[in-house]
Image (spheres, rainbow, N blue to C red):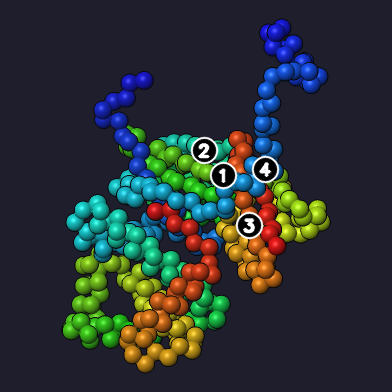
Amino acid sequence: MHVSAHAEQRRIFDRIVAVVDHDPILLSELHTAARPLLQMAPDEGKKQQALREMLDRVIDGRLVRREAAKKGLKAADNEIELAMDQIQKQAGVASRQALLDEIERQGETIPHYRAELEVQILTIRLVQLSGVKTDSNEKFERARKEYLERLRKSAYIEVRL
Amino acid sequence: MKRALFLLLLAACGGSPTPKVAPAPDRASLACAGDPVAKESGQRASDLASDLEGLPITRIDVQGNRRIPAEAFSIAMSLKPGDRLSHEAVAKGIRTAYEGGEIDDVQVFARQDGAGVILDLVVRERMHVAEIFAPGIPETSKAEMARWIGIEKGKPFDVADVSTNRHQIAETMSKRGAKLDVRTHVLANGELDVCILVQQ
């Protein structure tokens, strides 16, 4: 069979990259989450690394949301707003609009950025609820990693990246 | 041909002087010495053909289906020729197909076809359980154990369910000094045999 040199090769449009219990994570979803990292990645190797790193974060996010829902925890809109105020202050950005512009300039979408903040707030709550003493940043970070590790062990996680 | 039949007859009568050949392993042995229930691995393409978004779908081809008719996929995934290709619709379709319980994987490929786009849905159907073996375990206990683990003859084999259940049951059993293992042997027709192994 003759195939024209210009024949369009089929390319992946979307697929499952991971399954957390019965919850699939899609490649399109991962690309949206990793957009800022992908923009900065200079080559294919770094892009793959960025996707792998972001997939871990997306998986952790799923586990945290699920655990928070089980415990009836929510991050209210005003808590997310407060977190954005803090980020604005720490980054030394003059206005909220300037912060939003900067977030978008880095390839991030505002809904996704807010969703990330929500996961961070929920993670803090869950770690605090676990009863571990976290009176320093180092202790909190250690407790956070251990908590996420426990969540991962209790779930069925299949990576297809 | 006649000679072959004669030799077969001799062998059946037990009169053949030919050396003994080891009998082919039975299905239970194959299943029990099979693969532990494992997650899929392997690297695949990770770049998205997002530039094709918005083009009209001209055709949908389905590959890899055995039991489920090709048309059922486009219906279940709410994709049809004439629709504009969108990530949102395709993602929703993949989720719906996966959550149906009969599909393990769907990969959606796209290629430009003039002013439109052809979609290839590459699917992997979940294997169905052909037989369950449990050497040394009475039939009634075997049926109960299979139910706990989440396997049923003639039903799809859900690796996520089986892995999670097996892990939980194995933890309880290990406290009593027993070990639980679940192994599988893939058959040629999209089915698999499952073996439940309990060691005291």
The amino acid type found where label 4 is placed reads Ser
Q: Are marks 1 and 2 in contact (CB under 8 Å)?
A: yes
Per the image, the residue denoted by label 2 is B64
Front in this rendered view, residue A60 or B114: A60
Label 1 SS = strand
Which label was assigned to residue B181? Answer: 3
Query: What separation in Å lies between label 1 and label 3 (alpha carbons)?
Result: 24 Å
Q: Which of the two discs, 4 and 2, labels the residue nearer the N terminus?
A: 4
Query: What separation in Å lies between label 1 and label 4 (alpha carbons)?
Result: 25 Å
Per the image, the residue denoted by label 1 is B125
**Residue at x-position 58% and y-position 59%:** B163
Image vertical order of residue A80 relative to residue A149, above or below: below
Q: Which of the two discs, 1 and 4, labels the residue nearer the N terminus?
A: 4
Specify whether disc 3 shares its chain with disc 4. Answer: yes
Give the image quarter of residue A39. bottom left
Q: Are marks 3 and 2 in contact (CB under 8 Å)?
A: no
Specify whether disc 1 shares its chain with disc 4. Answer: yes
Specify whether disc 1 shares its chain with disc 3. Answer: yes
Return the x and y of residue B147 as percentages of the image width and height.
Answer: 72, 58
The amino acid type found where label 3 is placed reads Asp
Query: What separation in Å lies between label 3 and label 2 (alpha carbons)?
Result: 30 Å
Label 2 SS = loop
Viewer-nearest of discs 3 and 2:
3
